[in-house]
Amino acid sequence: MTATDTEALKERVCTAIDDRANDIVSLAESVQAEPELGYKEEKTTEKLADCFAEMDLDVETGLAVTGARARAGSGEFVAAVLGELDALVNNEHPLADSETGAVHACGHHAQLAHLAAVGYAFTETGVLNNLDGALELIAVPAEEYLDLEYRRGLINDGEIEFLGGKQELIRRGYFADVDCAAMVHAADETPGHEITTDFSTNGFVGKFITYEGKESHAGSAPEEGVNALNAATLGLNAVHTQRETFADEDHVRVHPIITKGGDGVNVVPADVRAESYVRAKDISAITDANTTVNRALESGAMAVGANVTIEDYPGYMPLQTDRTLVNHYNDNVQRVLGDDALVAERSHLTGSTDMGDVTQIVPGIHPWIGGFEGNVHARDFEVADTEMAYLLPAKVTACTLVDVFTDPEAREAIREAKDEKLSRETYLEQTRELRETISGEYLD
Ligand SMILES: [Zn+2]
């Protein structure tokens, strides 16, 4: 295929996105208007399933409780495009659901616009007919690692094994024949045409901490009780004393919250609960920091003679972006957005995503896209530029996939990168190793 042919295909996929612009924006706004939390995204799944069906594709739903997928084309090289279905909780956000507090303050609705737009780009043009490529469209559940009591219930009921949706999809084999994976994510405070393509992220372990004491009358007989809140306070402060021991280059982040501090103020607290992540740049740094954190947490229980149970769950793996995809993507950013586009420099980000897990087994890309104002997850987060938030990055992705589908060298490079990745089995083994329960018993 000549460069002119490739350029013509890019024109066609971009025009198809323009032709569907109203439908794509409506989909995003409809998702934003009915935010749902992870593994509960029933309406949102239906919206995406309807959208895939409209592309004349066979749709599978209920991938992992929720979620929908469809495949376009029958070529051998399979490129997956992912969009996250779930919202997060922030009751302070003006668009928060009044009952659940759910809100798309992480811009996942824009990812679904991106997913639909890339789908239209290829299905409405017939471009795939002449190429050795297939497009796997996946609307994935549960990226935000929250609402964890509910999800632990799903685990206990045998509905899922992992708290994160992409982890669960990997376990269920949905990436078995996928050669590469792409998605986009909203970035903080970037109302203009900024895109960050080449970076890594922290991974983490998720923690549930329970301090068990003994209740008694808080005024007349505290000496009869064992104060679990005091144990937790000491445990968390012991964690803080360890912060200076974390090496800067490991990018450790530990951010516990207390989710239950006691029952009634006149009873010595006997059941106190906390949650935390321990994040760092790679598995060994995560494990090292986690050992330190667990020792510190236990010290609080020892000091007051309480019990502590620490349940560690696999969090998300660090993100690795693929060199070939990044190079093509950057070229297409210039093509679609022109010279005022800003492709930000490589860096390490201390947040985490379960796209990290996907990139442990499949070459992938997860650009941070502009078009948004305010801080991700905060009350002031909103779409600032509809075209940038919902449409332009999809053109970049579609053009990048045209490059990959038309260029045998690119496909070869991506397949070689895939050979270097973990197998699904090794990934699952490594991830499962992070599940651990530690107890310290000091209660008489
Ligand atoms: Zn997000």
Image (cartoon, helix red, strand yellow):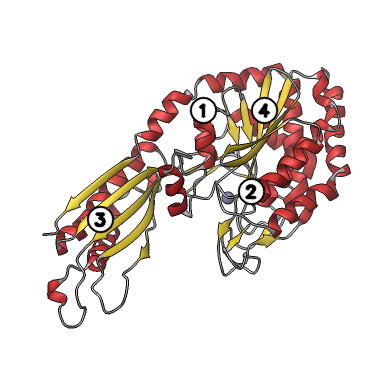
| Mark 4: secondary structure | strand
Badge 1 is on which residue? 361
Could you say where residue 288 lies in the image, as x and y percent from the top left?
A: 29, 42
Badge 3 is on which residue? 297
Q: Amino acid at mark 4?
A: Ala
Residue 315 can be seen, yes or no: no
Badge 4 local density, few (<14 within 10 Å), some, or many (20+)? many
Query: On the picture, is 443 further left or further right than 229?
Result: left
- Queried on whether the Cβ of the residue with tag 1 lies below 8 angstroms from ligand 1, the answer reads no
Badge 4 is on which residue? 79
Question: Which of the 4 image quarters holds residue 266?
Answer: bottom left
Q: Nearer the viewer, mark 2 or mark 3?
A: 2
Residue at position x 83%, y 38% in the image: 14
Split into 4 quadrants, where in the image is the C terminus? bottom left
Residue at position x 76%, y 21% in the image: 406
154 to 80, vertically: above or below = below
Q: Amino acid at mark 3?
A: Leu
Q: Earlier in the sequence, mark 2 or mark 1?
A: 2
Q: Amino acid at mark 1?
A: Ile
Marks 1/3 in contact by CB < 8 Å: the verdict is no
